Image (tube, rainbow, N blue to C red):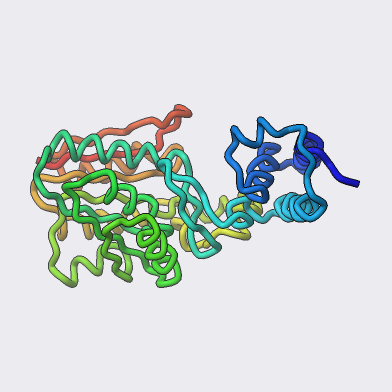
Amino acid sequence: MSKKVFEALKWASSFLKSAGRDENAGELLLRYRLNVSRAHLLSSLRDELSEEVYDQFEADVKQHVEGVPVQHIIGYEEFYGRRFKVNKEVLIPRPETEELVEGIVERVQRIFSTQPVEVVDVGTGSGAIAITLALELSTAAVTATDIAQASLDVANHNAKTLGAPVDFLCGDLLQPLIQQNKKIDVLVSNPPYIPDEDATTLSNVVKDHEPSRALFGGQDGLDFYRRFMEELPLVMNKKGIIGFEVGVGQAQTVANMLNETFPTAKVEVVYDINGKDRMVFVELN
């Protein structure tokens, strides 16, 4: 019994809703199976789906209901208008992280203008931040670090696919740079910041399918920021920019840490599009 596009979407939407999942996931999954844009999908609501496509789509929707992230089923996530491969070895890039990137781009252009800058993304995962900065800032030489080679393999694939010149280093936080005695102008990081005890409240889509090394930051979620305070003074140039993504409610604490580490710096907490205290930026001078 063949189904029309709108019937398939309607079924998926109610099935997902009743399972407590995002009902828009059906549209993404059907677009993936048909390999069409959103506009194309919406203009073909009365078209018939082949039985093969419908069966695959139904299986995809059921997989998502069981907790598999949509991005793992389709194999990618969009970030800053580009498509990044993702799998269970990397955190799926989130829309709010685009705002962190935007904040860095704006500051680099304002503070360094056309000067060449050394930029480092720590804990790069899929490479979304590093690759985007390399493509958006023609003056930047971008390096990305990650503790897991499996994550760097994904990031490397994304850099090659998108034609981004990024150097990848395997190692813990800033250690690869400290060992090389490397000095940098810009540091950006979206480190693990979820408090360990919050593991019980996380959706199984996140908890069971994204790497816990990229999620949890110790008892209060701030362990990585504490380590950054020890390592940052060893790598930052006198004039520079630091940008962190933080968990909701952590921004002021992280800002205080940075003020203590860099007493003469300008430190600001920036709220994301949803009104959450999501970023902390530092201007060193």
Q: How many marks?
A: 0
Write down the quadrant of residue 239 in the picture.
Answer: top left
Query: Where is 83 relative to 213, above or below?
Result: above
Q: Residue at x 75, y 52 (%)?
A: 53
Residue 245: x percent and y percent?
37, 44
Q: Residue at x 26, y 64 (%)?
A: 167
Residue 164: x percent and y percent?
30, 56
Question: Left or right of 177: which side holds 82?
Answer: right
Q: Residue at x 15, y 55 (%)?
A: 184
Q: Nearer the viewer, residue 12 or 195?
A: 12
Query: Where is 285 relative to 145, above or below?
Result: above
Residue 232: x percent and y percent?
21, 55
Q: Nearer the viewer, residue 235 or 10?
A: 10
Q: Nearer the viewer, residue 84 or 123?
A: 84
Q: Does residue 18 appear anywhere in the picture?
A: no
**Residue positioned most to the right:** 1
Q: Does residue 193 appear anywhere in the picture?
A: yes
Q: Residue at x 24, y 69 (%)?
A: 176
**The C terminus lies in quadrant:** top left
Question: Left or right of 229: which side holds 131?
Answer: right
Question: Left or right of 208: which side holds 281?
Answer: left
Residue 213: x percent and y percent?
47, 63
Question: Left or right of 121: which side holds 220?
Answer: right
